[in-house]
């Protein structure tokens, strides 16, 4: 299917003229003629989500997700995780903050992400490759072993060589470990994708990270977490991935979804080395924030920086213990 786009007579560079003091590209100053054919049909249909061409530069416009009309800071998580990805040499989609009028003339905050692959190549979600896990015992999550085994089987059926299959599975495992470190709680099987070339297939850049670092909590909850360290630790400990497993203690597990998943991942020696040598080293989050602020030409809200930093540090401490075999 050929993708349709809203056509806008500005380049992405020219949009800088519309950046406001809070760092948002104020697209309310641009007239949009919404076309249903340009709407992204995957994912939450209750949010603004349109493919748009800015002088042939292709982006996906997305309004923020609100629960009961209460705001959160998920849109900032997209930009923070993008910069962390770059620091760790993980390919990632490029994000920016926007304000835009929806088709009912309401002003909506959100983000846009630049098209992250050649649109002539096919993008296949992990869901399309492995199907539904109808036997999963987990609510809103897919079993780790099911995902790995079905991915391998699907790639074999598509005729790829063992080396290509092994690389894709390894890259996926590394990406899942990164998602765990980022406290990513909505990286479901539609939010991992693979780019299919003529004779190759490879994991796409990282995208859709708005449910990371606890920043998708409503603002009232975020303020509570920042004023109660025990509550922050508890929230961090239950921030689980959407792909994983749970092992009882008598099975050698930790009885924690994210911790047991990480333990399973590092049973692969290459993934262990990646976690130990790369992910388990503390990132200077203040430098990450500086990069985001340079892009936005504005300061991030202080609560965004505090929560992202401390959620990351609490998770990192436990992540290191598991990788080192201390728990």
Image: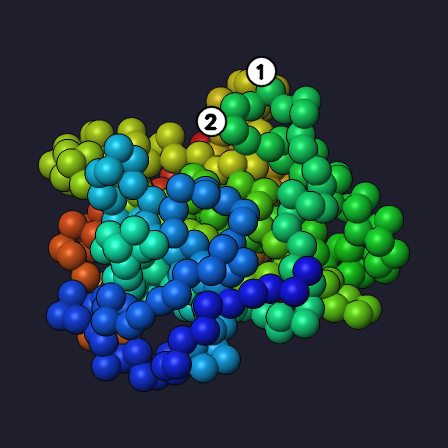
- Residue 256, numbered label: 2
Nearer the camera: disc 2 or disc 1: 2
Give the left or right position of residue 319, taking residue 121 as reference: left
10 horizontally vs 92: left or right: left
Report helix, strand or loop for mark 1. Answer: helix
Q: Secondary structure at mark 2?
A: loop
| Residue named by callout 1 | 250
The structure residue drawn at horizontal position 24% and vertical position 44%, both measured from the top left corner, is 72
Location of residue 22 with respect to 168 vertically, above or below: below
Numbered mark located on residue 32 in the image = none
Residue 192 picture location, percent across and down: 58, 50
Residue at point 47%, 48% (across, down): 179
Q: CA distance from mark 2 to mark 1?
A: 13 Å
Q: Contact, CB < 8 Å: mark 2 with mark 1? A: no
Which of 176 and 45 lies nearest the eye of the viewer? 45
Q: In the rendered view, does 142 fall on the left or right side of 181? A: right
Circle 2 crowding by C-alpha within 10 Å: few under 14, some 14–19, many from 20: some
Q: Residue at x 30, y 51 (%)?
A: 104
Quadrant in which the N terminus is drawn: bottom right
Q: Nearer the viewer, residue 293 or 278?
A: 293
Q: Position of residue 191 (x, y in %)?
A: 54, 48
Q: Residue furthest top?
A: 250
Q: Quadrant of the C terminus?
A: top left
Measured as percent of width and height from the top left, residue 56 is found at 50, 80
Q: Around disc 1, counting alpha carbons within 10 Å, would you say few (fewer than 14), some (14 to 19), or many (20 or more)? A: few
């Amino acid at each position: 299917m050929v993708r349709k786009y809203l056509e806008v007579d500005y380049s992405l560079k020219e949009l800088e003229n519309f950046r406001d003091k809070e760092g948002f590209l104020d697209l309310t100053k641009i007239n949009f003629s919404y076309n249903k054919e340009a709407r992204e049909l995957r994912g939450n249909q209750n949010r603004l989500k349109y493919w748009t061409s800015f002088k042939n530069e292709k982006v996906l416009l997305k309004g923020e997700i609100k629960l009961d009309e209460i705001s959160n800071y998920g849109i900032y998580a997209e930009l923070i995780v993008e910069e962390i990805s770059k620091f760790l040499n993980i390919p990632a989609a490029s994000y920016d903050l926007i304000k835009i009028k929806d088709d009912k003339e309401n002003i909506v905050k959100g983000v846009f992400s630049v098209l992250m692959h050649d649109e002539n190549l096919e993008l296949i979600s992990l869901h399309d490759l492995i199907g539904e896990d109808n036997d999963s015992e987990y609510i809103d999550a897919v079993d780790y072993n099911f995902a790995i085994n079905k991915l391998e089987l699907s790639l074999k059926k598509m005729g790829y060589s063992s080396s290509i299959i092994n690389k894709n599975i390894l890259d996926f495992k590394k990406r899942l470990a990164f998602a765990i470190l980022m406290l990513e709680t909505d990286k479901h099987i539609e939010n991992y994708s693979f780019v299919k070339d003529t004779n190759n297939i490879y994991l796409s850049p990282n995208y859709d990270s708005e449910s990371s670092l606890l920043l998708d909590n409503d603002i009232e909850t975020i303020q509570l977490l920042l004023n109660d360290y025990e509550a922050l630790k508890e929230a961090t400990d239950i921030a689980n991935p959407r792909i994983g497993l749970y092992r009882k203690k008598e099975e050698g597990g930790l009885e924690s979804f994210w911790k047991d998943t990480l333990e399973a991942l590092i049973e692969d020696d290459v993934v262990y080395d990646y976690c130990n040598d790369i992910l388990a080293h503390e990132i200077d989050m203040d430098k990450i924030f500086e990069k985001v602020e340079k892009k936005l030409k504005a300061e991030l809200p202080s609560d965004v920086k505090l929560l992202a930093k401390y959620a990351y540090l609490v998770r990192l401490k436990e992540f290191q213990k598991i990788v080192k075999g201390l728990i």
